[in-house]
Image (cartoon, rainbow, N blue to C red):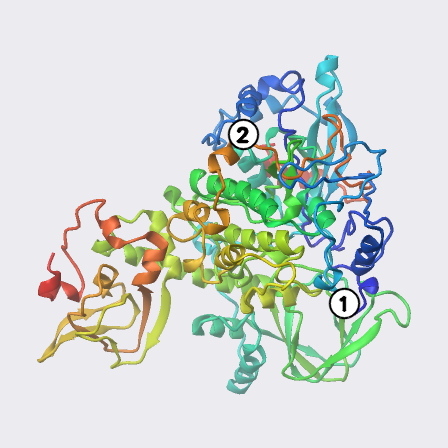
Amino acid sequence: MAATVAQSQHVLGAGGGLHPLQAQGLLASQHQSKPQQQQHQQPPQQHQNNGEGGNHFELESRKLSLSDFHRVRTLGTGTFARVVLVRPAYGTEAERSQVFALKILRKTEVIKLKQIDHVRHERQLLADVSGHPFITELMASFSDHDFLYLLLDYVPGGELFSYLRKFRRFDEDMARFYAAEIVLVLEYLHEQQGGIAYRDMKPENLLLDADGHIKLVDFGFAKRLGNNDNDHPVETYTLCGTPEYLAPEVIHNKGHTTAVDWWALGILIYEFLTGYPPFWHQNPIEIYKQIVEKPVVFPHDPPISDAAKDIIRQFCTVDRSRRLGNISGGAARVKAHPFFDGVDWDAIVHKRDRGPIVPPVRYPGDAQCFDIYPEEDATRDEYTGEMAQKYDDYFKDF
Amino acid sequence: MSSAGYTSPFGANSNPFGGANPGPMHRLVEEDENDTVTSPTTPSFSATGNVFGGSFGADSTSEGSFLGGLRSPPNPESYPAQYNFARRTSVSAESLKPVADTYDNWTPPSHAKTPEQLERLKNAISGNFLFSHLDDEQSAQILGALVEKPIPTKGIKVITQGDAGDFFYVVEKGSFDVYVNPSGALQPGPNGMGQNVGRIEAGGSFGELALMYNAPRAATVISAEPQCTLWALDRLTFRRILMESTFARRRMYESFLEEVPLLSTLTPYERSKIADALESQKFPAGHAIIREGEKGLSFFLLEAGEAVAYRSGNPTPVKHYKKGDFFGELALLNDAPRAASVVSATEVKVATLGKSAFQRLLGPVEGIMRRTKYVGVKSGVEEMDPLHVP
């Protein structure tokens, strides 16, 4: 596959605070409030770090380097990134028993694939949204000559994608549970974080923690839309996402907003319930043609409830002025849709019940829920001194 | 197309569960026969019946069938035969920022064409879904940006399977053969192009995916005769033309909306939502855009041209409108009859929004007005209607 498509990476998140030692150790001082937050299952806190100093990651992360970690195994790979399970290499036994997911991005590939902006947004936004119960948590970031690193909490349950393919499809109760958690994430990103569009919703980017709750990972395409002059919301134009999940306005380059995430949620619920997305073809251009021209059609088997069909159709509405989630009421209106009848939103946000799938995690650093990937990168281009001079300034936040 | 021979365009890591490389359908059949699926990483999962409290057998040594008890085995007939169940790769184009944000100077390239050439090009792209939604200005810019590429001899590879793709091509003259090598890329040797799968004649086009993002070419296209002519359009130009025009229009709408007293309490966020939902319409000179006495359903911004308001029985215009002016906004508030007719004095372009769309997006206008007291200082024609005097 030519180096022209930015493959999805997996950013891995927390193990649900299950590890008795996780609250201690190496990095505890860098994120004191976090383990507590996890134990008490606080609803999302609004806190914005705008990179203007005061960001605890930046202050502490200077000290970290790759040699501080022992590499256990790869959890996912992409065109310019790899996520590995790591343990601290030094410290007390308790400290060394901690596990993290380390996302490693190769500078040369980031530059070649013109992903510099996306990588910078990823680091910044992860820092901004850290601490939400359904979003992977950034512990630190650092860099060396060739690579950028994001140290993230380890989410041991693996990808929801793996379970969906294994089960082929979810019944409506399961789909509703995951959809409800995602609605809360989108409400947080869109409405409480000042208009962050996530832009790559799909089962591959949803991990399960040890209790079966969702963690949204990979903020490589996320973007804060309200960041131009005077926080004026501005639509964005860079095409990104996953072919089957792209909203029509992205395909047509009409400028897109957070409404693309609601479109993608419709596609996601469809895929949960049927096992495949509503628009698919071997040739991506045919997928795009269907997305802009064809209505969502449901199969006879499995039978899908009217409420589920309705919410999918309302999300997958080409006209954004009619799309559920984007229309007045925002996420509150989504929560009130009949598909979510009976959902206790307070219980969802506080993770009061375990998820419908409880991953077979045997111990905190267990990676059996992840597929096996080759540990070695193919030969890559060198990051030359000349490139470093030209580009390192862009990466100075790491 | 047989699933076994199909190489996923989405690539890497295709099969999370199967070992080697059976096609998707093959894998499904296998699963149905064995009712057990194993993953290299996960020797066995087993789920029990309870959907919300279900648990997996966590012991890697235990045998387990994950389908057991969860539900009856799905009917393989109900699955799309060719769907590739692999992980899907994200795609991304170059980051694009409007000129206004970057302070670059960018104007779309324009290459001269005869009226006949323009007409042929227009026809060639009119049916394509990537072009069919463009407005006249955008179309004109896109057509102007197409650049001529003479292909003098037979056997010239215009695009090569597996290579990066940056251009879309329209065939003006001659014909081109399309070859696909099942390996996904051109190979060395006499049959390296693979199979001939088709021919593109004058009026046809190819390479449209390159207008979206840089993906490997899915086929090799080679000239089938001498003296061919192509017109080429690169992705950055295409996307920038669309972006700049959309961006400029959106900002213009927002600034117009700021001037509407009825909407003065909208937040920038709400204004941008409204700007996003406005629809452009064109009318010839002398067209009655709204008619006195008719129920008002929509609100209008005058984007280009001029218009005048008349009241019945009075041949003298009671109001003149120019670019940036607005009328009919009280329709957002109620269904009362229009207080005057507004007629285009020149060809006009208006941006319009219906009351229903407004309410869908932001809720009732009354609620928005209640934020601060609406003082009807400057308004459209309705201010003249006794029913609507604030």
Residue B247, quarter of picture: bottom left
Where does the image place residue A154, in percent across and percent down from the top left?
Answer: 67, 30
Relative placement, left or right, of A267 versus A358 is left
Q: Label 2 is found on which chain of the structure? A: A
Residue A396 can be seen in this image: yes
Neighbours of disc 2 within 10 Å: few (<14), some (14-19), many (20+)? many
Q: Residue at x 22, y 55 (%)?
A: B262
Quadrant in which the N terminus of chain A is drawn:
bottom right
Image: B190 above or below A254: below
Q: Label 1 is found on which chain of the structure? A: B
Q: Residue at x 56, y 49 (%)?
A: A199
- Count of marks, rendered view: 2
Residue that numbered label 2 is attached to: A131
Which residue is most to the bottom? Answer: B116
Judging depth in this view, the residue of B116 and A222 nearest the camera is: A222
Image: A328 above or below B188: above
Image: B94 above or below A32: below
Kind of residue at badge 2: Gly
Residue B183 can be seen in this image: no
Kind of residue at badge 1: Thr
Judging depth in this view, the residue of A175 and B95 nearest the camera is: A175
Where does the image place residue B101, in percent across and percent down from the top left?
Answer: 45, 50
Where does the image place residue A117, in percent across and percent down from the top left?
Answer: 57, 44
Quadrant in which the C terminus of chain A is drawn:
top right
Residue that numbered label 1 is attached to: B160
Residue A92, quarter of picture: top right
C-alpha separation, residue under disc 1 versus residue under disc 2: 47 Å
